[in-house]
């Protein structure tokens, strides 16, 4: 009977020297050549250079992971440096992309507002470039200890830069294109407004948080990524987009928010997975201005998230104009959020009989309105869900005062909030948005 070899084998020292290290040297050659040129720069790198670094470190990280370098003392630090470069470089690439595209975005910014945003973006990019240079020098030093010398090859821009422009075939099959209608516009705008309100209300309610996690930022990043894809599928370059010019403002609001969240996710990942780990591995990095938690959190809150809120509110204003052009009442589609406080002594007023009519109010509106309480979500249109919600909320009222959040179309939220005030004395609690750009109240 033939004995088969195991799928995984631990390499010997000889195999590491004769097989793995030569492969690592070959795989890092192009990256080292580009990084050598990067270190010589006095100004910002081009997007092509940053994109090339991004492609190379991604490829090398995959190569190292195939050999389980993260579990090997000798190569662990090298792998951490590569992974860190990937995420810091991603922040730089997204920032440079926004700076290159800012003039083409339709955001209704004044010259002063645009200058302020651009200045803050440049400051963030410059700060990340400092860290990328620190990581590059550390990578060179660790490579030398591993016996990997820097290549002597001359840098050739055409050879070493990856082309970031994607070329596609001409879209000339017009007969199969979906014809966008007012209903398609309404559907996409409603999704945008709902997502924006959920985003804004979440970060405003958690505005005192010192750190926002990669998981949270990825959740919202993927939401706006889907919105951008939806818009581009049905509205971009369609005839109706020319009719409602403010649609381009909505698209710009989605796009720039997506890029800001890409930057936030990358910073969060870098800090959570690599930053502190590297600082602990190399005490010299603690003395350098490298991966400081306070600075990362400040950039996240005071720049990336605050501007995302601001730009989404501009998208809300564009949406309102579009609804008016379409002859529709904007308040039936624009989303709003209200926090309501109910006192514990109103327990008996919060009962099935007096509260259930709220479903009738919610059903007068086309869009759904939701009630959030104690991490539970209830659709106010559903009699079944409200029949579940009322006993749950009563249980909490027996323990003390409670807070409920009502979120949905602005007109519906206003009427439902008044209903809860009349039936159980619910008092509206102001949502304080502790960001540079506060949530607008209209």
Image: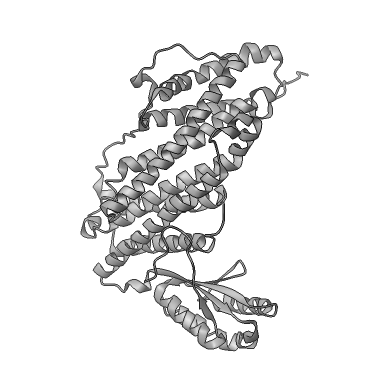
Q: Percent x, y for residue 197?
A: 44, 64
Q: Indicate the quadrant containing the N terminus: top left, top right, bottom left or bottom right.
A: top right
User: Is residue 176 among the parts visible in the rendering?
Assistant: yes
Q: Is residue 284 above or below residue 362?
A: above
Would you say 394 lies left or right of 327 here?
right
Q: Is residue 16 above or below residue 331?
A: above
Q: Percent x, y for residue 114?
A: 30, 50
Q: Indicate the quadrant containing the C terminus: top left, top right, bottom left or bottom right.
A: bottom left
Q: Is residue 101 above or below residue 47?
A: below
- Residue at horizontal 36%, vertical 45%? 119
Image coloring type? one colour
Q: Is residue 297 above or below residue 72?
A: below
Identity of the residue furthest to the front in this view: 287
Would you say 368 lies left or right of 44 here?
right
| Residue 2 picture quarter | top right
Would you say 309 lies left or right of 21 here?
left
Label count reads 0
Nearer to the camera, 354 or 142: 142
- Residue at horizontal 42%, vertical 49%? 258
Nearer to the camera, 119 or 347: 119
Identity of the residue furthest to the right in this view: 1
Nearer to the camera, 259 or 15: 259
Q: Percent x, y for residue 155?
A: 38, 17
- Residue at horizontal 62%, vertical 27%? 77
User: Is residue 178 among the parts visible in the rendering?
Assistant: no
Q: Percent x, y for residue 300?
A: 49, 49
| Residue 290 picture quarter | top right
| Residue 110 picture quarter | bottom left
């Amino acid at each position: 009977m033939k004995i088969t070899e195991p799928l995984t084998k631990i390499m010997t020292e000889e195999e590491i020297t004769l097989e793995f290290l030569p492969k690592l040297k070959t795989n890092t050659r192009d990256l080292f050549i580009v990084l050598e040129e990067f270190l010589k720069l006095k100004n910002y790198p081009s997007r092509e250079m940053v994109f090339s670094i991004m492609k190379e470190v991604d490829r090398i990280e995959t190569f190292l992971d195939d050999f389980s370098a993260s579990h090997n003392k000798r190569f662990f630090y090298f792998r951490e440096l590569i992974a860190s470069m990937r995420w810091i470089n991603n922040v730089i690439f997204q920032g440079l992309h926004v700076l290159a595209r800012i003039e083409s975005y339709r955001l209704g910014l004044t010259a002063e507002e645009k200058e302020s945003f651009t200045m803050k973006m440049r400051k963030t990019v410059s700060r990340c470039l400092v860290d990328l240079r620190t990581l590059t020098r550390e990578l060179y030093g660790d490579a030398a200890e591993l016996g990997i010398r820097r290549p002597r090859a001359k840098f050739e821009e055409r050879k070493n830069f990856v082309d970031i422009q994607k070329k596609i075939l001409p879209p000339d099959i017009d007969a199969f294109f979906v014809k966008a209608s007012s209903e398609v516009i309404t559907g996409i705008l409603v999704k945008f407004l709902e997502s924006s309100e959920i985003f804004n209300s979440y970060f405003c309610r958690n505005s005192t948080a010192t750190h926002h996690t990669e998981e949270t930022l990825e959740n919202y990043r993927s939401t706006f990524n889907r919105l951008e894809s939806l818009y581009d599928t049905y509205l971009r370059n369609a005839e109706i987009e020319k009719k409602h010019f403010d649609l381009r403002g909505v698209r710009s609001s989605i796009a720039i928010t997506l890029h800001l969240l890409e930057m936030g996710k990358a910073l969060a990942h870098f800090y959570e997975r690599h930053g502190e780990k590297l600082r602990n591995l190399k005490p010299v990095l603690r003395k350098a201005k490298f991966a400081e938690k306070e600075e990362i959190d400040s950039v996240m809150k005071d720049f990336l998230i605050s501007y995302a809120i601001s730009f989404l509110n501009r998208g809300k204003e564009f949406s309102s104009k579009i609804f008016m052009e379409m002859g529709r009442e904007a308040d039936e589609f624009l989303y709003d959020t209200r926090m309501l406080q109910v006192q514990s002594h109103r327990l008996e007023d919060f009962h099935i009989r007096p509260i259930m009519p709220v479903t009738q109010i919610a059903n007068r509106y086309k869009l759904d309105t939701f009630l959030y309480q104690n991490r539970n979500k209830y659709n106010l249109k559903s009699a079944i869900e409200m029949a579940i919600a009322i006993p749950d909320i009563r249980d909490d009222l027996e323990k003390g005062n409670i807070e409920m959040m009502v979120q949905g179309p602005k007109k519906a939220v206003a009427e439902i909030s008044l209903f809860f005030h009349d039936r159980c004395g619910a008092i509206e609690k102001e949502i304080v948005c502790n960001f540079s750009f506060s949530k607008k109240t209209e």
